[in-house]
Image (tube, grey):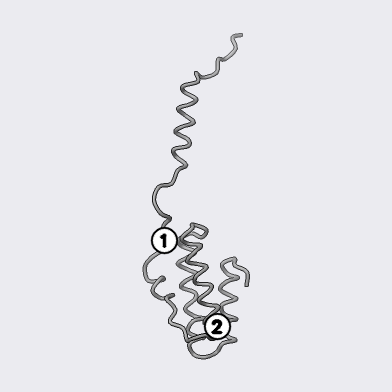
Amino acid sequence: MPVPMPPPLPILAALAVLGLAACTQTGAPTVAGGPAVAVASLDLPGSSACAQEIRAFRALLDRDNETGFVGPTVYRDATRDLAGPAETCRAGNDAAARAQLRAVKTRFGYPA
């Protein structure tokens, strides 16, 4: 019985190049846009604890989105869900806003 011959080296090299070419990404990561971004612009009062924490989490979400750590859908949903804690914070209920923020963080897998 004849022994099968391996494919010629040029074919293997071409397949390797094609495989690597398929793995490259060109351009910047996709940034979620639309209404969720505007909702979460977070016009929050001064230096209250809830305002600082909500702004810090939003900045983290923005960085994670820019680097591709979170997908556009997660980014959109998480920034949308910040509207509740932001509204509670604007109303002056710091403790409730921080509790709502912890719930949002937990829902999306961030440490609370």
Q: Nearer the viewer, residue 58 or 1?
A: 58
The circle on residue 80 is: none
Q: Does dot 1 land on a helix, a strand or a loop?
A: loop
Image quarter where the C terminus lies is bottom right
Q: Residues within 10 Å of mark 1 (few under 14, many from 20)?
A: some
Identify the amino acid type marked 2: Cys
Q: CA distance from mark 2 to mark 1?
A: 26 Å
Is disc 2 in contact with disc 1, using a CB cutoff of under 8 Å?
no
Q: Residues within 10 Å of mark 2 (few under 14, many from 20)?
A: many
Q: Position of residue 52 (x, y in %)?
A: 53, 80
Task: Answer with the quarter of the image where residue 3 lies.
Answer: top right
Residue 30 image point, x, y percent: 41, 57
Is 84 located above or below residue 15 in the figure? below
Label 2, secondary structure: give it: helix
Q: Earlier in the sequence, mark 2 or mark 1?
A: 1
**Residue at 53% in and 72% down:** 57
User: The N terminus appears in which quarter of the rendering?
Assistant: top right
- Which residue is painted at 50% across and 20% down in the image? 9
| Residue identifier under label 2 | 50
Instruction: Name which residue lies at 41% across and 63% down.
Output: 32
Which residue in the structure is indicated by mark 1?
31
The residue sitting at the left extreme is 34
